Amino acid sequence: MKTKKRILVIDDDKPLASMVKMNLEGTGDYDVCVENRSSRALRVAQDFEPDLILLDYIMPGLDGGDVSCRFHEDPKLSKVPLVMVTALVSNCEMGDDGTSQLGGHTMLAKPIRFHALLACIEKRLGVVA
C-alpha cells in the first residue's frame, strides 16, 4: 500500500487553502493540513511533520519570509521542501514548469494552476510519474 505524502498549506486565504486541500486530497496521494494563521505555522508544522510545505508569501503578521526563517532554524523542519505561493509574480513570469526560483525558494504564482502545483509538488518530493 502506497503511503500518502503529507502536505502543509499555510495561507490566510481560507477559500484558496480549502480548494488546494480538496484538490490534492482528491488525487488520493496526499494528506493535507491547512493553517490560516502564520503565527501558528511553526507549531502546526512541528505537530503535523509534513513532507512538503506550501507557504503563502504575503500574510498579515508574520509573512512567508519570516515563517520560512523559523522553519530553517528548526532542526525537524529545516530539510522539509518549501514552496512559496505568491501573487507578487504572475503565471506568465513562471518557467516552463510553472515555477521560478527566487532567494533560494521555489515560487509558484497565484492564481494557482493545479497542474503546475501538482508537477511542482511531485518534483520537490522526487515522485516519478
Image (spheres, rainbow, N blue to C red):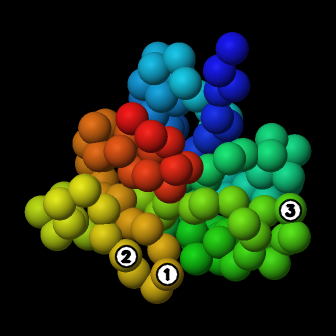
User: As drawn, which residue projects farthest toward the front?
Assistant: 128
Mark 1 crowd level (few <14, some 14–19, many ≥20, 10 Å Cα): few
Mark 2 crowd level (few <14, some 14–19, many ≥20, 10 Å Cα): few
Q: Which mark is residue 76?
A: 3
- Identify the residue at horizontal 50%, vertical 55% (top origin): 124
Q: In the image, what residue type sits under mark 1?
A: Gly
Q: Nearer the viewer, residue 121 or 43?
A: 121
Task: Give the spatial CA distance, label 3 vs label 2.
Answer: 24 Å
Q: Nearer the viewer, residue 17 or 1?
A: 1
The picture quadrant where one finds residue 93 is bottom left
Mark 3 residue element: loop
Q: Position of residue 81 (x, y in %)?
A: 61, 60
Question: Residue tagged by mark 1?
Answer: 104
- Identify the residue at horizontal 42%, vertical 59% (top origin): 85
How many numbered discs? 3
Q: Which mark is residue 101?
A: 2
In the figure, is residue 12 to the left or right of 46? left
Q: Which mark is residue 95?
A: none
Q: In the image, what residue type sits under mark 3?
A: Lys
Q: Position of residue 27 (x, y in %)?
A: 45, 20
Q: Is residue 102 above or below residue 50?
A: below
Q: Nearer the viewer, residue 62 or 89?
A: 89
Q: Position of residue 21 (x, y in %)?
A: 52, 29
Q: Do tag 1 and tag 2 residues touch (Cβ < 8 Å)?
A: yes
- Identify the residue at horizontal 78%, vertical 51% (top origin): 45
Of labels 1 and 3, earlier in sequence is 3
Mark 1 residue element: loop
Q: Is residue 91 above or below residue 71?
A: above
Mark 3 crowd level (few <14, some 14–19, many ≥20, 10 Å Cα): few
In the figure, is residue 42 to the left or right of 101? right
Q: Position of residue 49 (x, y in %)?
A: 80, 46
